Amino acid sequence: MPESTVSPADPATAQLGHALKPRQLIMMGLGSAIGAGLFLGSGVGVQAAGPAVLVSYLVAGALVIIVMNALGEMAAAKPASGAFSVYAADAMGATAGATVGWLWWAQLVIVIAAESVGAAGLLASVWPVLPVPLVSLAFMVLFTVINLMGVKNFGEFEFWFAIMKVAAIIAFILIGAALVFGLLPGVPSPGLSNFTAHGGFAPKGWAGIGTALLVVVFAFGGTEIVAVAAAETADPARSLARAIRTVAWRILVFYIGSLSVIIAVVPWTSDTLRSPFAAVLDMARIPYASTAITLIAVVALLSALNANLYGASRMAFSLAQREEAPRWLARISANRVPMMAVLISVLFGFVATVFELWYPNRVLPVLLNIVGSTCLLVWTISLLSQLILRRRAARAGTPLPFRMRGYPWITGFALGILALIFGLLLSSGDTRGQFLSMVALTAGIAIASETARRLRNKKRATA
């Protein structure tokens, strides 16, 4: 199908392409949930709860599966680049939609900078040839170009990034299983004693499981991008249903499988859990284990950077089309990419990256602390929107191409888990500031959005 050029002066009629393939959507969903947090940060959860961290991962995984199904139901009925922002606007009004959209955009553009700096730093630790600032900025330029090339190219890059991460996870689980069951020649098996040794399965009780839940739930952040990307597939309803069925159970298998191997091989009291995957591979006597895991983590960060830039640009595009952002952000290029939305999204990342490199560990930690809980709010709003829109569709007799099973009880269960997580955030001195910062930011965006809308309406009324 030939690509058409949309006039820059007519952003209201701008339409994105539909070149994203189902296989790319599926791997994007998998890749978004498998990040550097799993490869490098999962040991923090193990140390917080011991072997019972598996309970925390099961709870967090169940929550993500429910959220994905709720988003899938709404996205199949109404594919939109703004996804949950559009559904929140439909369910609870324009201010709710604009607030969650801008909040998610702010989170992504800040995280883009963190991922660029983080990937450059990790790469320098194993290949210290070029300075970190230069590599970081090179990453930003590279993925800006990829995102400007068209959604088909973006999807293909994400597909292969995800393939590498999934292959690494599968290889790790197989090596770990061989180690546990004594199948590696010359390497003694640790058996399964570590599941109950050193204080039992739950050495820190429910408090440890709750603390670990706060750590692990953020590892699943980013899965909501599947609902955003579905709008650029040829058959959103079918593609989404397939992606959700495929991705949901595989996320649990990969996470629970990886963590089971780590717990079986490495005592939860071990200092080597600072890099849990490398610790397991070292015990399996795999050469250059630390280097391999570091390079995989670099790939994971770059994949997330690529996906987050895509997600941020599509959200800015959607907000502009709904007049919740400057209209010029809705202009698209000849290859149906919201070029201005991509550039404005990456611009903040460039600025934040430069400041972080000038003032190390002073800029990004503050920004990340402000938006750290945003994904939880997005999930909450998405579930509430699904409750409202599903009830509305039932009253109107509107058929839904994809229906989430267990409604409304499953949705209520997920909202209960989120309420528990918000309670844990508020009760902990380490996370209370992050929660309150997110609340303040949300309130500020909501007030600004409502004020801007009233001014627009007043201007139109007097025109």
Image (cartoon, helix red, strand yellow):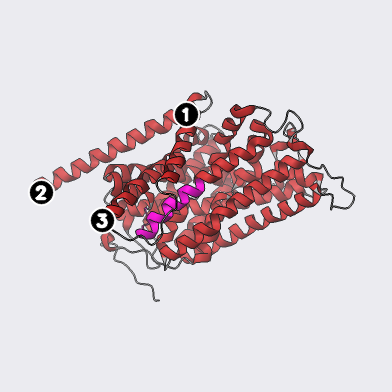
- Residue 397 position in % (x across, y down): 28, 58
Amino acid of disc 3: Ala
- Of badges 2 and 1, nearer the viewer stands 1
Numbered disc 2: secondary structure: loop
Q: Which residues are magenta?
A: 64-82
Amino acid of disc 2: Ala
Nearer the observer, 252 or 103:
252
- Residue 317 position in % (x across, y down): 35, 54
Which is the main secondary structure of the residues drawn in magenta?
Answer: helix
Numbered disc 3: secondary structure: helix
Residue bearing the label numbered 3: 396
* Residue 198 counted in the magenta span: no
- Residue 309 position in % (x across, y down): 47, 52
- Of badges 2 and 3, nearer the viewer stands 3
* Residue 79 counted in the magenta span: yes
Nearer the observer, 396 or 334:
396
Residue bearing the label numbered 2: 463
Residue bearing the label numbered 1: 423
- Residue 304 position in % (x across, y down): 54, 50
- Which residue appears at 41% of the width and 59% of the height? 402
**Quarter occupied by the N terminus:** bottom left
